[in-house]
Image: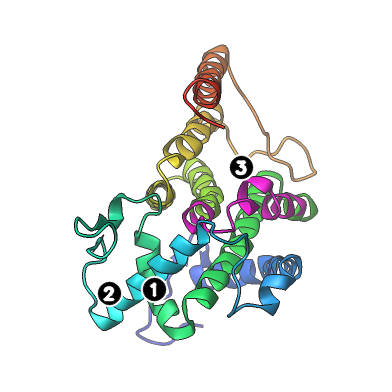
């Protein structure tokens, strides 16, 4: 019962607070399992959380260490400009914003760096991002299938995928983009499912997630936008509220020749660009 003078915020026939509580009860345990799996898989990192980085000596992780230290000094000590350091490549200096590692996320980690130090901040960020990455794929797959076990397995696969773990030593920006990507897909799906004002909210969240993915590395302009474009081409007109049987599974595809041609052309173009970059443009 509502108190006098206090309005109850509702979404459909159920209050938002109730919906949030139901989702926490449903998805909270899997999230805790992902936390435990991440800590178990990277127990060596946990054991040396404040003293060691993951990786080999003189890898890109040293650049991450510098960026964390510099952003902390800029924010809390007034050391200078977050986007320029005059002491690197002296006397010209170095425009940090033009480096391989975007500074935005390191700047956001400045409070954590101030609190626990550069090494622990990097390691905590890696562990937290890996957990959220696996959980994001779990949520995305659950929205597709409504099957908790299948969703959990999919999240575990993403958690240990070489395309992610290979970037742990120093490529925090790639880890961040890879973590946000499944949430961008999830929000896009919800934008296609919902109607009315709810659709606009999920569309806004999907756009923001996609933008934050791009901020991690320019290559995600292709890595993220192309699959999402294909996703929209295939699933735009699917009625996700209608189930194909009593098992609770949603229809996974309904395509026509036009969409098939678009997807094939898109995939072929992307594959050719990757092949050309690898063998003819100095790639390895």
Given the current orientation, which residue lies at the most extreme front position? 91
Tag 1, which secondary structure? Answer: helix
Name the N-terminal-most of marks 3 and 1: 1
Q: Is the image coloured rainbow, by chain, by secondary structure, or in one colour?
A: rainbow
Q: Is residue 81 left or right of residue 69?
A: left
Q: Is residue 202 visible?
A: no
Please tell me whether residue 65 belongs to the stretch shown in magenta: no
Return the residue at label 1.
Answer: 69
**Residue 228's spot in the image, x, y percent?**
50, 36
Tag 3, which secondary structure? Answer: loop
Return the residue at label 2.
Answer: 74
Identify the residue at image location x=49%, y=25%. Answer: 277
Return the residue at label 3.
Answer: 241
Question: What is the CA distance from the residue labelled 2 to the residue labelled 3?
Answer: 51 Å
Q: Is residue 242 visible?
A: yes
**Residue 249's spot in the image, x, y percent?**
73, 42
Question: What is the CA distance from the residue labelled 3 to the residue labelled 1?
Answer: 50 Å
Name the N-terminal-most of marks 1 and 2: 1
What crowding class fits label 2: few (fewer than 14 Cα within 10 Å), some (14-19), or many (20 or more)?
some
Q: Is residue 182 left or right of residue 191?
A: right
Identify the residue at image location x=61%, y=68%. Answer: 127
């Amino acid at each position: 019962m509502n108190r006098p003078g206090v309005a109850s915020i509702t979404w459909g026939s159920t209050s938002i607070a109730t919906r949030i509580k139901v989702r926490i009860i449903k998805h909270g345990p899997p999230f805790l399992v992902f936390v435990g799996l991440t800590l178990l898989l990277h127990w060596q990192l946990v054991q040396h959380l404040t003293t060691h980085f993951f990786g080999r000596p003189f890898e890109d992780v040293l650049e991450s260490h510098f960026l964390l230290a510099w952003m902390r000094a800029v924010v809390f000590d007034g050391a200078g400009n977050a986007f320029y350091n005059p002491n690197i490549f002296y006397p010209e200096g170095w425009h940090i914003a033009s480096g391989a590692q975007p500074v935005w996320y390191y700047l956001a980690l400045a409070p954590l760096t101030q609190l626990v130090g550069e090494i622990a901040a990097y390691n905590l960020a890696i562990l937290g991002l890996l957990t959220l990455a696996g959980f994001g794929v779990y949520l995305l797959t659950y929205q597709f299938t409504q099957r908790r076990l299948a969703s959990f397995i999919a999240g575990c696969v993403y958690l240990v995928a070489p395309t992610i773990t290979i970037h742990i030593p120093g490529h925090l920006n790639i880890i961040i983009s890879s973590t946000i990507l499944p949430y961008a897909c999830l929000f896009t799906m919800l934008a296609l499912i919902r109607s009315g004002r709810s659709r606009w909210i999920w569309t806004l969240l999907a756009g923001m997630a996609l933008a934050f993915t791009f901020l991690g590395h320019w290559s995600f302009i292709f890595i993220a936008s192309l699959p999402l474009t294909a996703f929209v081409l295939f699933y735009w007109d699917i009625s996700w509220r209608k189930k194909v049987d009593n098992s609770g599974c949603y229809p996974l595809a309904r395509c026509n020749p036009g969409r098939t041609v678009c997807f094939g052309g898109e995939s072929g173009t992307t594959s050719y660009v990757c092949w050309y970059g690898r063998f003819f443009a100095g790639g390895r």
